[in-house]
């Protein structure tokens, strides 16, 4: 198990646009080790996802997984997913306001995310995927792909009064957010 340091806001790597991974490099030891490091680091930090740029690697790879995560008990499950060279396309204009956090930013805040997106990516075996993601799962994909484009969730916060530390969010905002988002999850199913 290799847990790598997660870069924090202010580090210039978090603002770069990552480079595509050449298809013939996916099976290389270096790329496979990076994928394992991303998974180990995400799990160690109880994250819902992690992008390569967050551990200082300028390549378009992100991992996502939600199980019994104490940080996100309201999120629907996401099986371990490795997304190489992901591309997201919104399917319509429906948006939802979600409260996001990030392993690289010690704050949470409300952002608008598309509810329905198509994701196209390669997995760690180089197999092509073309899938529809909805709800909070679609939001997780958008968050991680933003990282690969040098965008942090705080760049998308429209109401700065929603910014809070994890502790302040838990004390003052969590209950209302979980109640609102649970109704949304019930409606869209993910």
Image: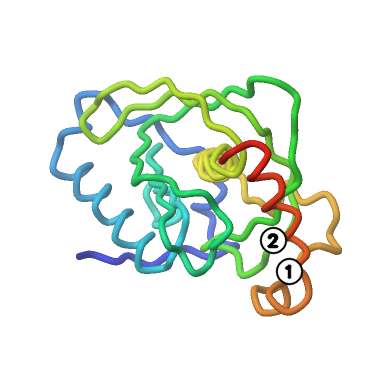
Residue 189, percent across and down?
Answer: 58, 39
Q: Between residues 139 and 121, which one lies in front from this camera angle? A: 139
Quarter occupied by residue 102: bottom right
Residue 124: image tag = none
Which residue occupies 54% across, 62% down? 73
- Determine whether the residue tagged by mark 2 lies in a helix, strand or loop: helix
Quarter occupied by residue 137: top right
Residue 153 left/right relative to 56? right
Colour scheme of this structure image?
rainbow
Pointers 1 and 2 in contact (C-beta within 8 Å): yes
- Image quarter (top left, top right, bottom left or bottom right) of the C terminus: top right
Relative to residue 179, is residue 82 depicted above or below? above
Relative to residue 16, is residue 92 depicted above or below? above
Badge 1: few (under 14), some or many (20 or more) residues near its Cα, within 10 Å? few
Quarter occupied by residue 134: top right
Q: Read off the residue under disc 1.
A: 175
Q: Read off the residue under disc 2.
A: 178
Which residue occupies 49% across, 69% down? 70
Label 1 – label 2 distance at C-alpha: 5 Å
Which residue occupies 69% across, 61% down? 178
Residue 88, percent across and down?
Answer: 54, 27
Which residue occupies 57% across, 48% down? 15
Q: Between residues 173 and 85, which one lies in front from this camera angle? A: 173
Q: Between residues 187 and 118, which one lies in front from this camera angle? A: 187
Residue 53 left/right relative to 92? left
């Amino acid at each position: 198990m290799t847990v790598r340091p997660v870069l924090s806001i202010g580090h210039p790597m978090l603002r770069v646009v990552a480079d595509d991974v050449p298809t013939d490099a996916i099976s290389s030891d270096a790329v496979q080790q990076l994928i394992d490091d991303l998974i180990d680091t995400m799990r160690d930090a109880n994250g819902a996802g992690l992008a390569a740029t967050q551990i200082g690697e300028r390549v378009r790879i992100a991992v996502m997984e939600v199980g019994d995560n104490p940080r996100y008990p309201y999120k629907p499950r996401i099986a371990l997913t490795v997304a190489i060279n992901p591309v997201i396309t919104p399917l319509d204009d429906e948006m939802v306001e979600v409260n996001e956090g990030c392993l690289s930013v010690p704050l949470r805040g409300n952002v608008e995310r598309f509810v329905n997106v198509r994701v196209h990516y390669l997995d760690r075996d180089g197999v092509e995927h073309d899938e529809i993601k909805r709800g909070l799962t679609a939001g997780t994909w958008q968050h991680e792909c933003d990282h690969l484009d040098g965008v942090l969730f705080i760049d998308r916060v429209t109401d700065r009064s929603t910014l809070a530390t994890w502790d302040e969010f838990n004390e003052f905002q969590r209950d209302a957010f979980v109640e609102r988002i649970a109704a949304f999850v019930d409606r869209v199913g993910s």
